[in-house]
Image (spheres, rainbow, N blue to C red):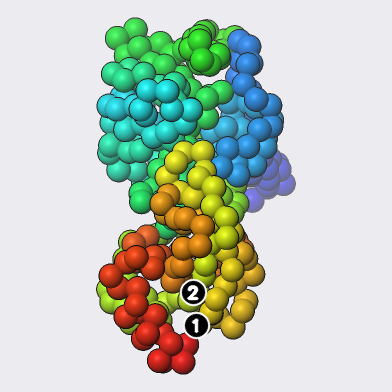
Amino acid sequence: MTKGRKTVLVAVVVLLVSAVAYSAVSVLFPTRRLALTEFHGPRGGTVFGLSPVEPTFENHVIWLSTNVIVGTVLTTPPEGASVGFYEVQVEENILSRTVESPIKVYGEGNLLTQGETYLLLLARFAAAEYPFDFYVARADFTFRVDIPSDQVQRLVNLPERVFIAPFQDPRYNSLSRLREYIRSLAPANKVHSSQFLRNNVQVIEEAPSQAALINMADHILLVEVVSAEPIRNGMLTRVEFTTLNEFKGEGRHGTNSLLLPPDAKVNQRFIIFLVEAEEGGVTWATRRGSVVAEDDPEFSALLEKLTASGR
């Protein structure tokens, strides 16, 4: 091979490597930023422990969204509820880490309207304390979709429910163009996990037997509630308690506060089966069967069994 041909070959290789490197950087670190028409949402606020990020569309897709869907609202929370669950029929998965349909979407009480279709940037939330997995919607990045005209509008004011064209570049105010852009961001999607945003957790619905539940639990406590306060959505009660006995775990559960069912009351006793969470703290071992109240028919027999076994 002549010296000239070698030079040309080296130049071609350098060009190819540069092109590949540039493409990789473009995918992993998108430089384009869609400028919003205006911003009315909370800057840097948190929802279910979502980490504060600069409120750009790209950041919400990349860092805060496990799923981006187009969906139609089937049901809404009870009238007057400050927050609650919407049932949403998934029409299209644009960015998805597996999603069933319909889904439960958690948000402010007047966020969505029954019968309307939305583009939703969602964060999956899975916790044994709740009776189902659900998805958290952020009011500041909720888009109403008009399918026939292929247009999207962004919600910028609650409770008045004001919608505007979301982006200064009008091309991206179409669903078809915005869909392509979201999919171009998908390779960079790296949702932040925290104690509250549990996008990788697989909740065990129920243990196959009482013996299996005892075996899988890291901690088994007999507690008495000393204070109880319902949380905002009314589905659970945060209690402080005194530990009367720890049948398993050797005093290492490290908490005197837990979420219990909504009817938990002061002075009520519970047997609770807990596991240690990867991100720290403890959570129910299973969605069903891990919290046994003293008025439950199984309570006395279970307490006697745990006590007799020396746990």
Where is residue 23 drawn, in percent x and y? 59, 37
* 2 vs 1, front mark: 2
- Quadrant of residue 35 in the image? top right
Is residue 198 in sight in this rendering?
Answer: no
Is residue 207 in sight in this rendering?
Answer: yes
**Closer to the camera, 234 or 118?**
234
- What residue does disc 2 label? 222
Secondary structure beneath dot 1 equals strand
In-image side of 107 versus 78 (left or right): right
Where is residue 244 drawn, in percent x and y? 55, 76
User: Can you say whether 311 is above or below 51 in the image?
Assistant: below
Tag 2 and tag 1, C-beta contact below 8 Å: yes
The residue lying at 42 percent from left, 33 percent from top is: 84
- Quadrant of residue 191 in the image? top right
Where is residue 310 drawn, in percent x and y? 46, 92
Secondary structure beneath dot 2 equals strand
- What residue does disc 1 label? 247
User: Can you say whether 130 is above or below 14 in the image?
Assistant: below
Query: Pointer 2: residues within 10 angstroms few (<14), some, or many (20+)?
Result: many
